[in-house]
Amino acid sequence: MTDLGLRFSVDGPVARVVLDRPEVRNAQTPAMWSALADFGTSLPPEVRVVVVSGEGPSFSAGLDRRLIMGENDLGQEPLLTLGAKPTAEVYELIAGFQAGFSWLRRPEIISIAAVQGHAVGAGFQLALACDLRVVTPDARFSMREPSLGLVPDLGGTQPLVQLVGYARALEICATSRWVEAAEAKELGLANIVVPAEELEATVKDLSDALLGPLPGAIRETKALLLGAADRSYEDQLKAEREAQERRLKELLAALQG
């Protein structure tokens, strides 16, 4: 996938996605989103952690600006031409774009974004698609879509609200301002801020820690947490009971088998 600006690898329980277009700050294209979706659907069942990072000094500067309107040398359709298509086709195309991000939230994996430099627009949403974010002091987040007359449509709105609350999420999106690393940590957007030279080692330590518990326990726990905000307290208690019963049966079967 290097011709698309992506590198994929799988090493036992850890998979890695590297955005590899450093000459344009890892700007993204719909072709990259399609490749991301394909990689997500093809993951071996033993993969439990996915690390997403960017080559060079930036995580991702968002959608390649050459694809917003007019002719480009990328061989891909400009985004604004979607406005001339039938509604059903637009919905289908955008759903395909979203699939490149949404698989990172599947309960059977925990995804980590290793963010340095710019994480703008689609780059911000890719970081938000991940469960955890480890960032360097120079990391800068910005949701630029509204400033271009568009909306964030790659799955970033829900996790942003869940992390920082409605009012702060609205302010960040409506102003398209920069959120620097220190504020990101304060708001809960970043789990930890580490020096750039420690980013790789920190992500490895975190990955190793996440691989410690049994896979089924992590899968069920993530599913409980993902759905907690949409359930009543009683429904959440019910979901916990059901998840625990599944775990008890799986553990007993493993001991007896």
Image: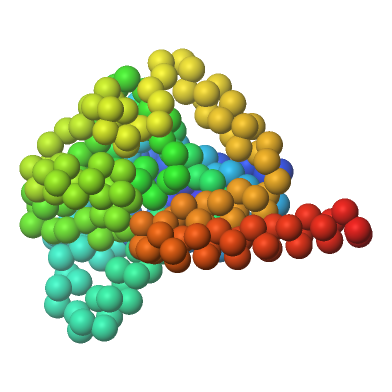
For image coordinates 59% across by 61% down, the residue present is: 241
Q: Is residue 138 left or right of residue 172?
A: right
Above or below, 96 against 224 in this view is below
Front position in the image: 91 or 70: 91
Q: Residue furthest right?
A: 257
Above or below, 131 against 140 in this view is below
The quadrant in which residue 87 appears is: bottom left
Q: Residue furthest front?
A: 234
Front position in the image: 102 or 96: 102
For image coordinates 43% across by 51% down, the residue present is: 4
Above or below, 63 against 25 in this view is below
What quarter of the picture does the C terminus occupy?
bottom right
**Residue 211 seen by the camera:** yes
Residue 15: image location, x then y, percent? 60, 44
Front position in the image: 52 or 64: 52
The quadrant in which residue 254 appears is: bottom right
Residue 155: image location, x then y, percent? 32, 58
For image coordinates 52% across by 65% down, the residue present is: 238
Residue 16: image location, x then y, percent? 55, 42
Q: Is residue 1 left or right of residue 166?
A: right
**Residue 11 seen by the camera:** no
For image coordinates 50% across by 60% down, the residue present is: 237
Residue 173: image location, x then y, percent? 15, 47
Q: In this figure, what is the number of numbered marks?
A: 0
